[in-house]
Image: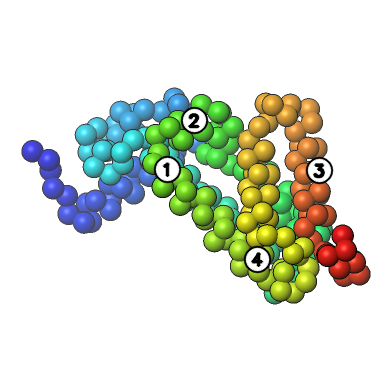
Amino acid sequence: MVKRFSESEKESIRSKLIAVGRELFAERGLQKTGVAEITSRAGIAQGTFYLFFESKEALFFEILQREEESIRTSLFDEHLSGDGRVTREGFERFLTDSLFSIRRHPLIRHLYDERTMESLFRKLPPETLAAHASKDEETLLPFIDRGRREGWLVPAEPSAIVNLIRSAVLLSFQRERIGEPSYDATLRLLAHCIACGLILEEGDNDASSR
């Protein structure tokens, strides 16, 4: 018979699984962490895990989304939260910090492992992945609208701008293919090129003549 948990017990168990999962995934990655190890450290029965998450991939993904949201908020607050004109230099710093903060993060860096990405795409429902992708648009569209309205962002399709930035993030996970010796320089140059292509400085010709 399945044990019934009170709402407070459910909240406690879920929080414990997330805390333990974050610790183990950051330390060992998705591939080397098992449900049995998570539940053992959390002090709950293995079967209880599946009352809260369908798989370890589902737990990993929830933690990943929380971490990404924290990083996203921090980067926007630091670089893009003001009401003034965004400069190329400022936007380049935002992009560079974004790409390198992903690399340094103890959990997100495990996405450099292609097997982890494959596991997530294989195990997670398409609608879950689509909802995750929409977060980028929700975050960037107000910024894009303001930039186009105020005249310091090129009048490209907003979805194209979102996809361009998303592509840069995805490229940052290809460290092995890019090659370690030139990886940092490649990301910095990429951030520079995107900033130069998207941000209009005062005195530039009208974007339509570019």
Q: Horizontally, is 107 left or right of 1 in the view?
A: right
Label 3: which secondary element: helix
Label 4: which secondary element: helix
The residue lying furthest to the front in this view is 208
Label 2: which secondary element: helix
User: What kind of residue is marked 2?
Assistant: Glu
Give the distance between the C-alpha atoms of the residues marked 2 and 1, in whole angstroms.
13 Å
Whichever of callouts 2 and 1 sits on the residue coming sooner in the sequence is: 2
Numbered label attached to residue 189? 3
Give the distance between the C-alpha atoms of the residues marked 4 and 1, in whole angstroms.
27 Å
Quarter assignment of residue 126: top left
Q: Horizontally, is 191 left or right of 204 in the view?
A: left
Contact between labelled residues 3 and 2, with CB atoms less than 8 Å apart: no
Asked if 137 appears above or below 184 in the picture, the reply is below
Q: Residues within 10 Å of mark 2 (few under 14, many from 20)?
A: few
User: What kind of residue is marked 3?
Assistant: Leu
